[in-house]
Amino acid sequence: MTDADTIVAAATPPGRGGVGIVRLSGPAAQRVATGVLGTLPPPRRAVFAAFRDAAHQSIDAGLVLFFPAPHSYTGEDVVELHGHGGPVILETLIARLVELGARRARPGEFTQRAFLNDKLDLAQAEAVADLIDAGSREAARAAMRSLQGEFSTMIQVLTGAVIDLRVHVEAAIDFPEEEIDFLADTALQERFAAVRRHFEAVTRSAGQGRLLRDGMTVVLAGAPNAGKSSLLNRLAGYDAAIVTAAPGTTRDVLRERIHVDGMPLHILDTAGLRTAQDPIEAEGIRRAQAEMARADRVLFLVDGAADPTAQAYRDLAATLPAQVPVTLVFNKIDLADACALAPPPGVPRLEISARTGDGVEGLRAHLKSSMGYHSLETGSVSARQRHLEALARARAGIEEAAQVLAETRAGELVAQELRAAQRALDEIGGEFTNEDLLGRIFSSFCIGK
């Protein structure tokens, strides 16, 4: 499999539909497409044509679009066949194109070729998948801003500021005989301060975008009958979980995905924490503890009417993962005496009624605040965890350079840290990357894109 291959795939989702699109891209796209069409239409003009098999029998009929290189999505010759959206028709057409010399595309291979042919940088390519997978209007808008290059522009401007720092420092290294100590210049300190402010702005925007894409994972934990399933149903807006008075009803992990002002919220309802005799319930409790270790936050529910001092939390606190923040949620406040509630000190607490909905809006606000999510953020761009990690490494390089400058004024060491910071930023757009990273990124795309 090489970039010289001509690739083919359905560009519409599997299943039945009114329209199905088959996309060809590569150096032999014109020849392969001509094998089913007879002739190609003029560039970028939709023409109705019959799609024929080897015996010249009609497979289907529809619109044909031809985009010659380099003015296409991939930068190669691209032909799109827009026919009927039946899976048998699409598969028959793709099989005929494979007979004529194309091969089936790997996941994300069209977009990977667009990246390799400089039609998109890597951040824009990832935004394509984020736009397709967007679960809210806010996430879609953020992905569109990244696809249009806003995030890439932010990174380019930030990289330019780092390069300016490097130029200043390396000039001081190259001209040590000058009487002026360029490394002691106040202008250099001001540039470091400006770069820090720029990092803060870009990281804030990218952090919001990462939340819009990945969201927050919350595990509902607590003793049996504390109201975990009732709260899941209240947040989901329908009866996602069975609710009964019998303890141990929830045996497995129940998952729901909702949105809080555009931020995806992955809610996991787990088995009540206790010493279980039933092996099935014990397995449910083990799974609950495993999910808590992977969560962004644990909501530990307490029956405020039956346990106003949160003794259940005190008894089970040692079993909770130390690295995951916990919020204590007193449930059933419609049945409890608010004055009798006595939570352990040092633990954030909320009071709700999953049955009536009292306090649930405050819970939603608490979850957004704990993740630093601002629903009115208009400049958010789609970003991924790898982008935030690269930004963090770049910023750490800037801070290390500033510290070395302040302590030793060793220009070579300062320049080395600045080069490392620039290299980390280059990873975001794909100017510096490796094939393993590209493989992981594009393997997550859908086939045909």
Image (cartoon, rainbow, N blue to C red):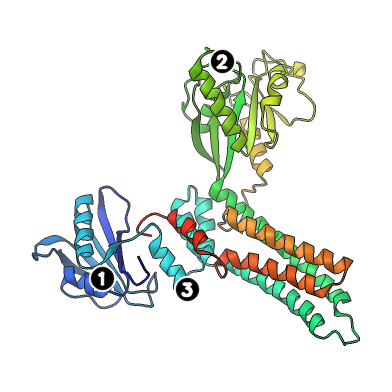
State the SS at label 2. loop
Asked whether, in this view, residue 269 is left or right of residue 18, the answer is right
Type of amino acid under label 3:
Asp
- Please identify the quadrant where the C terminus is shown: bottom left
Q: Position of residue 296 (x, y in %)?
A: 63, 39
Of badges 1 and 2, nearer the viewer stands: 2
Residue 72 visible from this viewpoint: yes
Q: Are marks 1 and 3 in contact (CB under 8 Å)?
A: no
Alpha carbon separation for disc pair 1 and 2: 66 Å
State the SS at label 3. loop
Q: Position of residue 437 (x, y in %)?
A: 52, 59
Mark 1 or mark 2, which has the lower sequence index?
1
* Residue at the outermost right position: 179
Q: Which residue is mark 1?
A: 46
Of badges 1 and 3, nearer the viewer stands: 3
Type of amino acid under label 2:
Ala
Determine whether 180 is above or below 371 in the image: below
Of badges 3 and 2, nearer the viewer stands: 2
Asked whether, in this view, residue 244 is left or right of residue 108, the answer is right
